[in-house]
Image (tube, grey):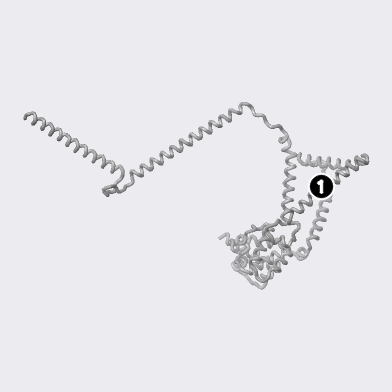
Amino acid sequence: MAGSLKERELSIKIYNKLQALGCPSVEGLFLREAVGMKELLCTPSMHRLDILQWICTSICPPMKKHFSGLKGPQPDSQIKELVQFCHEMLLCRQDDFDLIKGVSSPQRQLALLEQLVDVIPRDESEAREPLGEQVCRNEALLKELFSSPHLQTMLHPTCNPWPVEIRELLSRREAAGQSSNTAPKKSRNLPSKQREDSLKEVTESLQKTNTALEEIHKECVFLHLDPQSSGSSSTHLSPPALRLAIVDLSQLMTAFSQLYDSDFREYCNRAAPQLRKSAEAFSTAHSLLAACTKELQALNQLSLTSLALTSTVEGQQQCRRFWSRGHMQSLPAKIEELKRRYKDFLCIYQRSRERMREESAGEKRDYRRE
């Protein structure tokens, strides 16, 4: 009940935002109930795909060329383009077609629509501003921020309130800056031949760097592709995703280098510890304990086998079955019957034997008398 109430509130919120932004697919619809709004936003239909297409083209205007190139109503191609766009926005998986079609749960669909609607530019000046102007404006803002005197006092304080690892990093940077400033003065005092040699070395290193960069540029196929074609293909990596990965990697490397310089360096430079001779006793004890463990496992397995055999015998004893004479009896009852029959047979056999002895004795007497 709480989930459905939250979905209704979210449907009303997204519907009102779409009307405020002027979505043409919502204009002329006078929906007042949350159930109708939820059905419009979470039910598979071409109307819903048109709303998603308008949201994506509002976020990224170059996407209009992709959708205008589709001839006639092609929902499959339209869904593929929308999935690719949402995947590049890190909002869904690359094969999450059910989310775009409207087959998945309403909660996921409404969450995706809310995230997409929040990214749409609010005013027209922001929407129509080209990307180059935005980059220039952001660079100017960053320059103004870093040229602020308050920021400089924070970066270079007089009392130096930074922690130990930050102090070490700042001192190394200052030392590197001083060495780079003194290097040109030293190069002026060098002879002309040494200057030429150093210039040749620098030229060779630059040529090697250029050749390496050209090889890397040839390997990066996505840099040569058209951004429109690369946006629709799923086999190549997009440049924004590569930039994001490089930024994350550089931040991780910077953090690790600072941590290594401050904490790990002294531990990594130490010599390996020397093991004592008494350490062999631990290996012997380990082998003995391993053998003891195997023996205990074997005993445990033996006890389990004995229990299984006992249960099987008890089941055979309690189970009743048909024997040769057609009577249903259990095994102990059958054994008792066989014992009784054997005793009866022994009694009859002993009696017949005694009779035979008596008859043979009587015949002997009669023969003697004769």
Rendered residue at 66%/67% (across/down): 51
Placement of the C terminus among the 4 image quadrants: top left
Rendered residue at 60%/68% (across/down): 36
Placement of the N terminus among the 4 image quadrants: bottom right
Residue 182 falls left or right of residue 75? right
In percent of width and height, residue 306 lies at 41, 38
Residue lying at the far left of the rendered structure: 370
Residue 58 falls left or right of residue 323? right
In percent of width and height, residue 60 lies at 73, 63
Number of on-image labels: 1
Q: Is residue 169 above or below residue 79?
A: above
Q: Is residue 98 above or below residue 175?
A: below
In percent of width and height, residue 202 lies at 86, 45
Is residue 13 in sight in this rendering? no
Is residue 29 in sight in this rendering? yes
In percent of width and height, residue 56 lies at 69, 64
Which residue is denoted by mark 1 in the rendering? Answer: 208
Rendered residue at 78%/39% (across/down): 168
